[in-house]
Structure formats: C-alpha cells, structure tokens
Amino acid sequence: MASQHYDLIIIGGGPAGQSAALIAGRTRMKTAFINAESPRNFVTTASHGFLTRDGAHPSELLAVAKEQLHKYPTVNYIAGKVSEVSRLAGGFSATTAQGATMTATRMLIATGHRDNLDQLDLPGIEDVYGKSVYPCPFCDGYEHSDEALAIFGHGAIEHFVPMMRIWSRDMIVFTNGNPLDAKVKAELQAKGVPVEEAGVASLRSKGGTLTHVVLDDGREIARQSGFVVEEFSSPATDFAVRLGVIANEENDWGMSELAGANGTTNIPGLYIVGDARMGFAGIAAAVSEGGFCVEMIAHEVAMERWAVLLEEPK
Ligand SMILES: Cc1cc2nc3c(=O)[nH]c(=O)nc-3n(C[C@H](O)[C@H](O)[C@H](O)COP(=O)(O)OP(=O)(O)OC[C@H]3O[C@@H](n4cnc5c(N)ncnc54)[C@H](O)[C@@H]3O)c2cc1C
C-alpha cells in the first residue's frame, strides 16, 4: 500500500485527540487522525464535570465530535488501530493493524491509559466499575452524595478520606490485606472512619450497584458505592517509549509525566497529550491540552513556512 504524507499524525481520538483534530482542521493542517474508538471511560454510565455536557455518556461526546469534524477537509479520519510507529529522518510514520502506512513531519500521541482492574485484586469489581465504584471522586462523587461509601486502598488515604467528606461522612476504608500506617489509622478512627484491614473476598452487587463488601473472614459489610484510591492504570500504548521519550518527574499524583504541560517531549516534533501524558487528565483538561498543543504546532508550522517564503515559487 502506498504511504501518504501529512503535516501531522494524531493517534487516539478521545477528548484529547478529538480536540487536537478539531484545531488541526481549523488551522488547515493536512492531518491523519487514527482512532481505535475504545476509550477507558466507555464503561461508565455518564461522564460529569464537562461544561455543557454534564451527565452525557462518553459515546455521545465522541459522536458529536466526529460529526463536527466532517466539515474540515484537511483531516483524514481513520477508524482503526495503529500497531507500529517509527522515527524517520525529519518525521514519523504510523502503520495501522489493517496495513495502511502514513508519514508526517509531526506526531501527536493521545492514546490514553488502560485500566488494569486485575491489579486491584477485588473480585467482582468488573461488575461495578464505572457504575457504582469509580476511580475519580470529582467525576462521580456528587452522584453518590451521602451514601455509604467504601474507600478501597491504603496509599495516600490521609489525603483521600478528608476530601471524600465533601460528598459523604459515611465511609469505611478497606485496605484489602495491606496494613495501614498506624498513625494514619488512629487518626481515621478517631475522626469516625472505620478501617478494615482484612482481605476483600468479593464485591457483591445488583445490576451494577455495589451492595456489600465481603471480607476474607466472612463478614459482609453493606455499602452503596465506592472509590478506589490506588493507581491501577498504565499507558494504553508504548509508542512514546518506543519512539524514545524520556519521562519527566512524577506529578503530584505519583504518576510520571511523559511530556510537559503543553505536550512537548524530548523528541522534536513528537507530542503527547491527555491521559497518555499524565495518567488521568479528566475530559476538560484533555480537551484543553489537545487543542492548545495543536495551536502551538500550527504556530511552529506557520513560522517555518514564513521563514522560507521568499524561496517558494509564486
Ligand atoms: C470509569 C471512568 C470514569 C470517568 N469519568 C469521568 C468523568 O465523569 N469526567 C471526566 O472529566 N473524566 C472522567 N474520566 C476520565 C476521562 O475519561 C479521561 O481523563 C479522558 O477520557 C482522557 O482523554 P484522552 O483523550 O486522553 O484518552 P481516552 O479518552 O482514553 O482516549 C484515548 C483514545 O485513543 C484510542 N487508542 C488507544 N490506542 C490506540 C491505537 N493503538 N491506535 C488508535 N487509537 C488508539 C482509544 O481507542 C481511545 O479512543 C473517567 C475515567 C474512567 C476510567
């Protein structure tokens, strides 16, 4: 198959990639936009906190974004999965699982993260994840205000529990067999938050709603919803590493960032935005990062063209 050359290849079309593609279209950049259309938040029943779309299912955001992208002729939307990426002299190439190869001067990775639920060792979590047990209180805390909450985890619990009181005072911390720091445990208990250090045998649920946390010692503790404190996701692709990106320092959430806030990496012409950059951006930040990064790229491209303007044929 003959390969096509573009100004920009965008890999991944969640909020970050869609926003990047929209600005690429609006800046008339010749763009290949490849999207496998399987973001991590599709398990959820609704996404929250994004202006004008509070409560919409993520698939609705994707559908509207795709529809609005249609009017920009310089963006070639390809529904498919990139399986190979490489660096070339003066650019990059991407090959899809279907065997189409394209090259570009610049590449933007927006492939997000994938959740590794097995890592949590909470049997039954797949039935409730995104429906009544979540990774992000800002995304779903409000909908579970004043419920009986299960907080799963043991690291950074001293920050998480005080914050969760925004939404409910009825919390039990389940460390799933991990001992909690004695001082942290004493403070939680003194402030009315019970701590269960026994292993979790299973999460019992009905129609996606958590009903009980069953412990290894046989006790069944009634809870209505839950939040997971531990980090259990990893980059959905290893493209950044394969292309030679060196991670920056860890951010406040303990996740190593692969690019600076504006998406730039140690490799000229290669950009990373959204969850792929820093683990958990949230929709608003992913949209902001994707759009801003391509505005910056458009500026760079314009300056390059400007610099050689006198040499171009009239
Ligand atoms: C259960 C859950 C609930 C959430 N709820 C909310 C919420 O209510 N509000 C909120 O703001 N945030 C929420 N988030 C976080 C939010 O979903 C992410 O921060 C956001 O989607 C990140 O956007 P992104 O574009 O960086 O990545 P993603 O949305 O993950 O998109 C990545 C895209 O890249 C594609 N892709 C991956 N690999 C390839 C490949 N090889 N080739 C081509 N395409 C590829 C994927 O198919 C996907 O479409 C939630 C997350 C989860 C897990």
Image (tube, grey):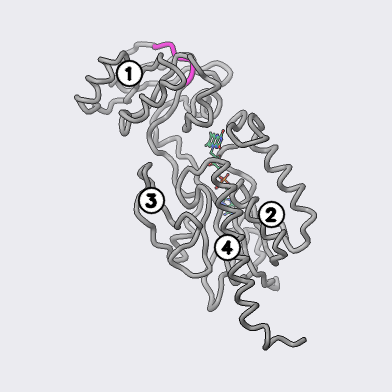
Measured as percent of width and height from the top left, residue 99 is found at 65, 64
Give residue 22's mark.
2
- Does residue 119 appear left or right of residue 302 in this picture? left
Q: Nearer the viewer, residue 87 or 25?
A: 25
Image quadrant in which the C terminus is located: bottom right
Q: Residue at image x 67%, y 65%? A: 100
Measured as percent of width and height from the top left, residue 137 is found at 47, 29
Tell me the distance, in whole angstroms, between the alpha carbons under discs 4 and 3.
23 Å
- Does residue 263 appear left or right of residue 306 in this picture? left
Residue 111 drawn above or below residue 231: below
Tell me the distance, in whole angstroms, between the alpha carbons under discs 1 and 3.
34 Å
Tell me the distance, in whole angstroms, between the alpha carbons under discs 4 and 1.
53 Å
Among the two numbered marks 1 and 3 on one chain, the one whose residue lies closer to the N terminus: 1
Image quadrant in which the N terminus is located: bottom right
Whether the residue under disc 3 has CB within 8 Å of ligand 1: no
Ligand 1 location (quadrant): top right
Give the foreground label among 4 and 2: 4
- Give the residues in magenta: 221-225
Residue type at mark 4 is Met
Q: Residue at image x 59%, y 65%? A: 297
Residue 31 drawn above or below residue 195: below
Residue type at mark 2 is Leu
Give the foreground label among 1 and 2: 2
Looking at this rendering, what residue extends furthest in the left direction? 182
- Magenta segment's dominant SS is strand
Whether the residue under disc 4 has CB within 8 Å of ligand 1: no
Among the two numbered marks 4 and 1 on one chain, the one whose residue lies closer to the N terminus: 1
Q: Secondary structure at mark 2?
A: helix
Give residue 256's mark.
3
Q: Which residue is mark 4?
A: 296
Q: Which residue is mark 1?
A: 216
